[in-house]
Each structure stands twice: as structure tokens, then as C-alpha cells.
Image: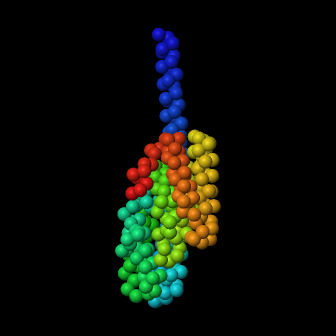
Amino acid sequence: MQSFVCAGRLVLGGILLAASLAGARAATIDESVERYRAYIIGNVDEALAGARGLRERIAAKDLAGARRAWIEARVGWERAEVFTGGFVSDLDDKIDGWPNATTGFHAVEAALFVRGTTDGLAPEADKLVLHLTDLDLKVHQMRLSGQGMLDGAARLTYEIGESKADGGESRLSGTSLDDMVNNLAGLEQAYSVIFAAPLATADATLARQAQAQIERLSTLLTVGDLRRVDPDRVRAASEDLVVTLQAAAAALGLRRPTLEMLVQ
């Protein structure tokens, strides 16, 4: 009987210790998410400033200037996508829906880079600025979570390999490679600020693996020209990182991002 009681105490002690460690990791992640908010705000502010510049160039009927402003606005936006898909999917669709875009960045892209005109684009530019302004307000105020950021990181990683590596979303402007590079920059930013330290504590092997896989993707995308991207290798590297992020969820006490969630 005494040995049974002792064993029970050991089991209970183990459970309490595990719960305590999980709680500590969750607290660390929550603090890191709040530090990361500043990076999201910076990325969204950059996209909004670019969209305002785009609207000005469209109003001035400056086609070359509007094209430059469109490309500049995309940098901050693509880096922010690690956040937008998981927290503001409705705005994400209005701002950057593709491939069948009827509004947002890609509706403007078609006019500027294919039809070669700024005519009739003022209302679309106004809507783009309006939606990015709404996003800017939300990112200052809304509650963020480690779970949402991990889901967003896994989804964006999957998208880089499965949806963008074969030619990307910005084919008309020729900036698809920039999209992927900036997506990865945003992903690496989120991982390093939010997850790297707690994952290194929880599972150092997984942490090293995640960092190596991010660096591998970066190498595959640092080629200077979309025609030099190897889609199969990018897809494989993307899938490997998704699997690692799924494994990291358990180590961090978070829910595992599912395939159904990734392909939404």
C-alpha cells in the first residue's frame, strides 16, 4: 500500500511538473508574441505607406511611378502575411486575394503591368488604402496568440512551397520571387522572435532543425531570378519545415497545425 501511494505521488508530481513547464512555456510565448507585435505594425505601416504612394501616383496618371509604388507596397505586405492569414483572413482576401483577383493588389497589378494604364484605378486604390488602414488599426488592438502565430507560420510555409514555387502569385509584375523572399523573411522574423528560444528550451534538436530548414529555404530562394528557382526542391524544403513546425507544436504545448488548416 505504501509503495502504491509513493508511486501515485511520483506520477502526480510528474504531471504537476509537466503542467508547470507547459505553463511557463506558454507565458514565455505570450510575452514573445507581444514583442513581435511591433514587427507586424512596422510591416503593415510599410505596406500602407506604399499603398498611399500608389494612390498618389495613380491620381497623377504616373504609370511608371505607380508600378514602383505597387512593388514597394508589397514588401511589407508579404512579410506581414505570417500574421494576416491566421488572424484577419477576411481582410487578407480583400487586400491580396488571388489567383482570381477582382480587388486589391492583384486587380491593380493587372491594370498597371498588363493593360499598362492607371485609368479607372482610383476607386481600387482607395479601397486598398482603406483595407490596409483597417488592418493597421486591428494590428494595434487585437489579441494575438502563440497558437495563431504558429498556425500562420505553418500555413505560409506550406503556401511558399505548394502555391508559389511554380511561378508565384505576382506573375504579371514579375515580382513573384520577391514575394517568396519577403514571405520567408516575415516567417523567419516571427520564428526567431516568438518560438526560437522556447523551442530551444523544450527540444533543442527540433529548434536546430527548424533553423536549418529556414536557412535551407532561404538558400533555395536566393537565386536572383524566378527561372532559377527549383520548384521541386523548394516544395520539399517547405514540406520538411511544415512537419518540423507541427512537431514543435507539441513541444511548445500548442495544437498541431493540420493539413486541412494549411490548405484553406
From the viewer's side, name the closer residue of 6 and 68. 68
Colour scheme used in the picture? rainbow
| Badge count | 0
Residue drawn at the location 61% of the way across and 62% of the way down: 220
**Looking at the rendering, which quadrant does residue 123 occupy?**
bottom left
Q: Residue furthest top?
A: 1
Query: In the image, 78: left or right of 89?
Result: right
**Looking at the rendering, which quadrant does residue 110 occupy?**
bottom left
* Res. 89 visible in picture: yes
Query: In the image, 170: left or right of 230?
Result: left
Question: Where is residue 214 drawn, in percent x and y?
Answer: 59, 55
Question: Where is residue 77 drawn, in percent x and y?
Answer: 49, 68
Question: Where is residue 122 drawn, in percent x and y?
Answer: 39, 83
From the viewer's side, name the closer residue of 210 and 165. 165
* Res. 35 visible in picture: no
Residue drawn at the location 40% of the way across and 88% of the way down: 119
Image height of 77 relative to 162, above or below: below
Residue drawn at the location 48% of the way across and 14% of the way down: 4
Question: Where is residue 8 drawn, in percent x and y?
Answer: 48, 19
Query: In the image, 147: left or right of 219?
Result: left
